[in-house]
Amino acid sequence: MTLEEKIFNQERLTFEEAVALYDLDLFTLGKVANKIRREKFANKSYFNINRHINPTNICKDVCQFCAYSSSRKNPNPYTMSHEEIMADVAKAVEKDIKEVHIVSAHNPDTGLEWYMDIFKKIKDTYPQLHVKALTAAEIHFLSQEYNLTYEEIIAKMLESGVDSMPGGGAEIFDEKVRKKICGGKVTSQQWLDIHQLWHQQGKQSNATMLFGHVETREHRIDHMLRLRDLQDKTGGFNAFIPLVYQKENNYLKVKEFPTGQEILKTFAIARILLNNIPHIKAYWVTSTMKLALLAQEFGADDLDGTIQKESIQSAAGAASANGMPLQTFIDVIKNSGFVPVERDSVYNEIKVW
Ligand code: V47
């Protein structure tokens, strides 16, 4: 059977076969990825009305790709008080958000309670709001800093009302690349172990992959296959999110950036390869909205959300600092020929717009 026949029949691929997918032309990959996407979700494109909050940018780790941390080229250290965070949440709730997505840097000065108590405050005030918070990288940092096991940190998250975990901190799992771009923070195996423990609590999470920097196609495939293996065991991942590397204000020296074609191929390959992860998210912040809309034809079925404020990728050059107005979001999805379906954080459908 040829590779093309194998993917049309949706057979599971080996590492070598998956790497060879990149040698197929974009439209062959797109045809298969789009077929799978339409079989699962027809012409629906999911999004949610959400608010990102990044409460501190003071970080003890040094990731070469990061422009958000205050140790980077644009130092502007800040740590929000809980009152400030609650004021932002209150304003966002007025705009009908369903999810607050809270991700911080690894700040050694705040104390563990500063990280945990804010979730409880939000949950006590807005029980209906979904709290998506703490990446595996943050959980690892807190466990090291406060001498607690991952299980103990996870127990505290559950007690404080965290509903799901975001997919950040995965970067690229290949150990050599990881050492170069973010040596010292959560290892690949630790990242996977933390998600496994979270899933074992009956909870769901997402998984990201940062690509388009110094990694190769092989590294991307290795990354996706490590996720596919864990998903076989737990089934706890909702979405896979390929994040396109943004190059401003950081210390990673990258010479060549992926073409639009390479980015679309990566979305299509993710859809074909990750046949056990339901959703492929084209995070418009890093791909640009135009490419995210096109990615809908190449396997992606989710565009994340309206965000309202974005600090991590916008620090590195993305045009996302103020999120996107709901009406614009809906209009662009409709104009691209898809049906905007508002979802909650774990993909229950809320409203067809
Ligand atoms: O892990 C940092 C990335 C991630 C850059 O789970 C960069 O639904 C591009 O994970 N260029 C955090 N990316 C954001 C994240 C996320 C975003 C949206 C939705 C979800 C979800 C998760 O941001 C980090 C890192 O990989 N990042 N710097 C950069 N220069």
Image (spheres, rainbow, N blue to C red):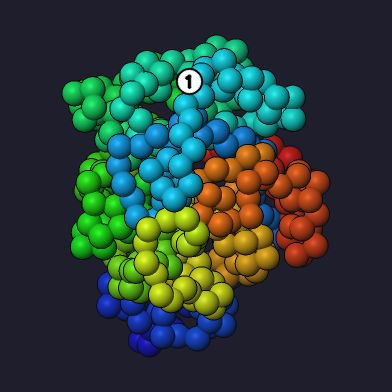
Q: Quick check: 152 above or below 229? A: above
Where's residue 340, x and y in %? 73, 51
Report the residue marked by disc 1: 119
Q: Is residue 214 left or right of residue 302?
A: left
The crowd level at tag 1 (other Cα within 10 Å; few <14, some 14-19, many 20+) is many
Give the quadrant of residue 57: top left
Q: Horizontal and vertical percent for residue 342?
A: 69, 43
Task: Evaluate whether residue 47 shows in this view.
Answer: yes
Three-letter code, disc 1: Phe
Q: Is residue 59 left or right of residue 98?
A: left
Residue occupying image coordinates x 51% and y 71%: 263
In this rendering, the count of numbered labels is 1
**Residue 296 at what x, y percent from top left?**
63, 64
- Quick check: 233 left or right of 33? left
Instruction: Say which of 215 and 30 sits in front.
Output: 215
Specify whether 24 is left or right of 307.
left
Q: Which secondary structure lies at badge 1?
A: helix
